Structures are given as structure tokens and as C-alpha cells.
Amino acid sequence: MRRIASSALRSVEFKYRRVGPELRCSYCGDTGDTIDHAVPRSHVREHIRAYRRNWFPKVAACAECNSLLGDQVDATFHERKRRVADCLRARYAKVLLAGGWDETELVELGYSLRHSIEAAMYAGRRAASRIAFASIGATADVPDDLFGLFTSQDDAE
């Protein structure tokens, strides 16, 4: 895959508009501490002439979801969320199975084992919550169509 210089990627930043919630990951509902360009900058840079009249969404994302998405292109925001849900489900498969211990069983265990199981159960509940959020369709205020939805105001006239 051809590497694109970071200065070239910054040069297409004007093609993006911020949409969706500010502080919440648009994919899993966790704290959004990064920005995800829903149509990757590398793709827009390579096809800048084809998209010269389009604007693209960028949304808040947690670092994990942004990393999982990488620079792959999806046609709709719903497809991106579904891909995140699938990746999270695969990544957290073991902790999702950690449930099923009740308090009476945990009391009988030693401190270290009990602590490990409780931590895995917490991680499983958190992962299940993030996967459930990612499995929901489009997020409010985020357009589902990532290509061609935003056109410049000059084109509308």
C-alpha cells in the first residue's frame, strides 16, 4: 500500500465537517478521545478530483474504535458501526464468556482468583455494552451515507 505524507493528508482536512456527539464515541458510546474521518483522509486524497464538491463527516471516536477502523472505506456509517461491533466481539470473545459466577461462588474463592474473575466479569459487561451500542443502526446527527451527502452550498445554488 502506498504511504501518503502527513502534510498531504492535512491538505484535505478542509473537506471534512464535524458531526455527531462531541465527547462520546459515535461507534461504541465510550468516551470519544480521538476524531475518526468516516471516509479516510488517505482515500479522499487519492480521489480528490472525484470528490471536489463533496464534504465528508468526521466524528468523535475512542482510540480503540478509531484504530480498529483504520483506513478502510465503508459505504455507510451503519456499515462502519457493524464492522466495529464485529471487531469488538472478536477481540473480547473470552471476557464475554466470563459471566455466570454468583456471589456465593465467588466468596469461596481466594482473593487473587476472585479478583481476576470479577475483573473479567466487569470487562465482559463493559464490552457487551459497547457491542450493543455499536450494533444499533445509525447514530443521531451522523449521516448514514458517507459519500455525496454533503455538497458545498455553492453547488446548491
Image (cartoon, rainbow, N blue to C red):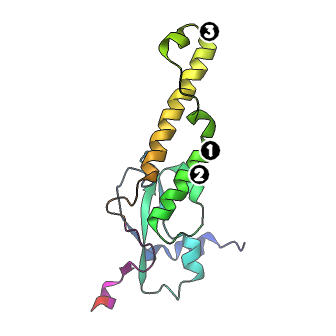
The residue at which mark 1 appears reads as 91
Residue displayed at 56% across by 35% down? 96
Q: Is residue 71 above or below residue 100?
A: below
Q: Which residues are magenta?
A: 143-155
Q: Amino acid at mark 2?
A: Cys
Q: Position of residue 73 (x, y in %)?
A: 56, 70
Residue displayed at 43% across by 51% down? 25
Residue 111 visible, this orientation: yes
Q: Is residue 23 above or below residue 15?
A: above
Q: Position of residue 151 (x, y in %)?
A: 37, 82
The residue at which mark 3 appears reads as 110
Q: Which mark is residue 87?
A: 2
**Mark 2 crowdedness (10 Å alpha carbons): few <14, some 14-19, many ≥20:** some
Which one is in front, 112 or 31?
112
**Mark 1 crowdedness (10 Å alpha carbons): few <14, some 14-19, many ≥20:** few
Mark 2 lies on a secondary structure that is helix
Q: Amino acid at mark 1?
A: Arg
Q: Main secondary structure of the magenta part?
A: loop
Q: Earlier in the sequence, mark 2 or mark 3?
A: 2
Question: Mark 1 and 2 residues: CB-CB less than 8 Å, in contact?
Answer: yes
**Mark 3 crowdedness (10 Å alpha carbons): few <14, some 14-19, many ≥20:** few
Q: Amino acid at mark 3?
A: Gly
| Quadrant of the drawing holding the N terminus | bottom right
Mark 1 lies on a secondary structure that is helix
